[in-house]
Amino acid sequence: MESSEFYDMDPVTIPHVDNDLDWVNAPISVPTPVFQTSPPVADCNPINNQLAEAFQQLSENLNRESAPKPFQSKAYILDIFDSSNPYKLNHFLFQYRLYFCANSLQFPTDEEKINFTMTYLFGVVQDWFEVALQQEDLSYAQPWLFTWHLFVEELWVHFRLSDPVGDAANLIDNLCMKPGDKIATYNMEFMWYVAQLN
């Protein structure tokens, strides 16, 4: 029966159309297409091959996620402290506080700060801490090895001026502006000595 004949027929009499709809739910088997891939044809031109390899390496490098590098400030070389001039102790400690703030990722713990600072101690100060470290090796506990403020206190107790208040009072009495000095220099020195009196 040709398809044109279905237009003239009554829908009830069209073949395969009845009240039984099982044929609608019947699975339809569709053949899976098979794609045949041919191996890549090698280019005879060696320059093209080198370019292809270079592009592939470049794309692999771009896809790699590199970890961000921690920020590290470039500070100038730090001063040493050898106790020959006790006035320099406060400046020495201030300088290291600034350095640790600028490089906080390098020195996350007090112990790392202390170990780093000890490498800049020389002379009598280094000898004193060397003896203290030998005592630590003999199981004599040194709490200043692990706490920054105790380490600073240890330096102050043993290597500061013997009479900082008296020295500050004497320096205030003798404070004067030198030729060519600025008022800011005089004020800074005055405030420094007054801070020692408090």
Image (spheres, grey):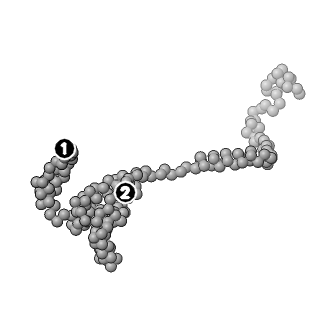
Mark 2 or mark 1: name the one nearer the start of the chain. Answer: 2
Q: Is residue 173 above or below residue 129?
A: above
Report the front residue among 159 and 64. 159
Give the side of residue 141 with respect to residue 39, left or right.
left
Report the front residue among 90 and 85. 85
Tell me the crowding category of disc 1: few under 14, some 14 to 19, or many 20 or more residues within 10 angstroms, Cα based: few
Residue highlighted by disc 1: 183
Tell me the crowding category of disc 2: few under 14, some 14 to 19, or many 20 or more residues within 10 angstroms, Cα based: few
List x then y, in percent, for residue 80: 32, 62
Q: Residue 22 sits in which quadrant?
A: top right
Quadrant of the snapshot with the C terminus: bottom left
Residue highlighted by disc 2: 77
List x then y, in percent, for residue 105: 40, 55
User: The residue under label 1 is which amino acid type?
Assistant: Ile
Residue, far top: 8
Specify whether residue 110 is in view: no
At mark 2, the secondary structure is loop
List x then y, in percent, for residue 183: 19, 43
Q: CA distance from mark 2 to mark 1?
A: 29 Å
